[in-house]
Image: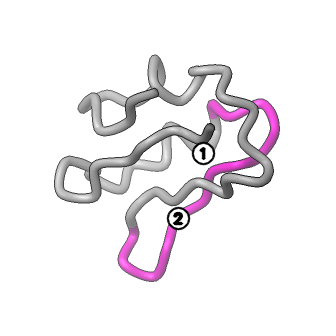
């Protein structure tokens, strides 16, 4: 199961994108983080990388 991203809390910093070891995260057209569920390995690296706790498992 992929992570959940709170779009309202996401500040668009991109920290999670750089923190994902498999490249499952990217930024959408609105500058918010989005997760590719097919690529996500549910490791939690992005959860601990997000400075505003916008990502959860």
Mark 2 or mark 1: whose residue is earlier in sequence: 1
Residue sitting at x 28%, y 58%? 7
Position of residue 49 relative to residue 34, above or below, is above
Task: Label 1: state its secondary structure.
Answer: helix
Find residue 17 and name its label. Answer: 1
Residue sitting at x 57%, y 21%? 44
User: In whole angstroms, how far apart are the C-alphas of marks 2 and 1?
Assistant: 8 Å
The answer to which of 53 and 2 lies nearer the viewer is 2
Q: Main secondary structure of the magenta part?
A: loop
Q: Position of residue 10 (x, y in %)?
A: 28, 50
Structural crowding at the residue carrying mark 2, measured as other residues with C-alpha within 10 Å and reported as few (<14), some (14–19) or many (≥20): some
Position of residue 49 relative to residue 35, above or below, is above
**Region of the chain picked out in magenta, as a range:** 19-31
Q: Position of residue 5 (x, y in %)?
A: 38, 47
Find residue 44 and name its label. Answer: none
Task: Label 2: state its secondary structure.
Answer: strand
Q: Position of residue 16 (x, y in %)?
A: 53, 38
Q: How is the image coloured?
A: one colour
Name the image quarter holding residue 52: top left
Q: Which residue is mark 2?
A: 27
Residue sitting at x 39%, y 63%? 32
Q: Decide: marks 2, 1 in contact (CB < 8 A)?
A: yes
1 relative position to 7: left or right: right
Position of residue 7 relative to residue 23, above or below, is below
Residue farthest to the left, as pictured = 8
Residue sitting at x 49%, y 73%? 28
9 relative position to 19: left or right: left
């Amino acid at each position: 199961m992929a992570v959940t991203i709170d779009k309202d809390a996401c500040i668009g910093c991109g920290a999670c994108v750089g923190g994902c070891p498999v490249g499952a995260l990217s930024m959408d057209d609105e500058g918010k983080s989005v997760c590719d569920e097919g690529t996500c390995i549910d490791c939690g690296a992005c959860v601990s990388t997000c400075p505003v706790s916008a990502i959860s498992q």
